[in-house]
Amino acid sequence: DNKNLQFTPSEKKLIEEAGFILTNAHVVEGVSSARIKMSDGRLFIGSVIGRDELIDLALLKVSGSELPVVELGNSDENALRQGDEVFTLGYPFGLEGDVKFKEGTISGRQTYEDATYLETSAEIHPGNSGGPLVNRFGQVVGVNVGAYGKSIGGISVGETIKWAIPINIAK
C-alpha cells in the first residue's frame, strides 16, 4: 500500500509530540502509509489514520522520540485579519535543499463549495501544499492547499489565488 510516497525533509512538523502530522488529503491520496523524512535526516513510516477529502485534510501518525512539534495558532477572524503577515514553508516541485520560505499577507477569506479558505498573497507552489501557513509568531494558522489560476503542465502562469485551510477547521 505504501506506493513509495515520500514527504521531503519535513516542514510538516508534528502537531503533537504523540507523532501526529497534518497535511492535505490529496497529498496522500490512494495510500495508507508514507515515508516521512525529517529535516534532521531521520526517516519514518507514517500511517494515514484519517482523511477528509471534502475539506482536503489528512492525519498521519509516526512513532519516534524527540519529534519536532509546531504550535497551532488561531485562525478566527478576530485573531487573523486581512493584511496580517503570513509565511508559507515548503519544497515546491519536490526540490530538496533549504526549505523555501515565502512571505505574504492574508488577502481575505474565500468561500468555495461550502468551505471557507484563507486567501494569501504568499506563494503556494505544487509540492508545498499540505505545508504550514504560519503567522509572524511562528504559529500554524493554516494548511496550504493550493492555487487557483491558469496553469501549463501543472505550473501556474500569471495571477493566481492561493488558499489555505484555516487551522481552526483542521482542529
Image (cartoon, rainbow, N blue to C red):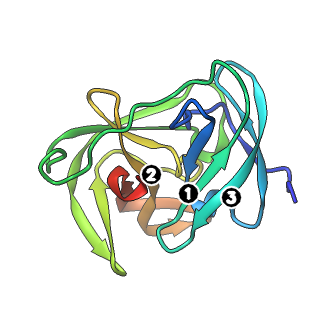
Residue 51 placement (x, y as % from top left): 60, 64
Q: Which amino acid type is marked by label 3?
A: Val
The residue indicated by pointer 1 is 24
Mark 2 secondary-structure assignment: strand
Disc 2 marks a residue whose amino acid type is Asn
Q: What residue lies at 67% left-to-right and 28% top-to-bottom?
A: 38
Q: Is residue 149 left or right of residue 105?
A: right
Q: Is residue 101 above or below residue 145?
A: above
- Work out whether mark 3 precedes mark 2 in sequence or the reverse, and give the earlier one: 3
| Front residue of 89 and 161 | 89
User: How many neighbours does mark 3 have within 10 angstroms: few (below 14), some (14-19), or many (20 or more)?
Assistant: many
Frontmost residue, 70 versus 125:
70
The N terminus is located in which quarter?
bottom right
Residue 92, given in percent of the width and then of the height, sits at 57, 43
- Tag in front: 3 or 2: 3
- Marks 3 and 2, how far apart at CA: 14 Å
Q: Which residue is mark 3?
A: 28
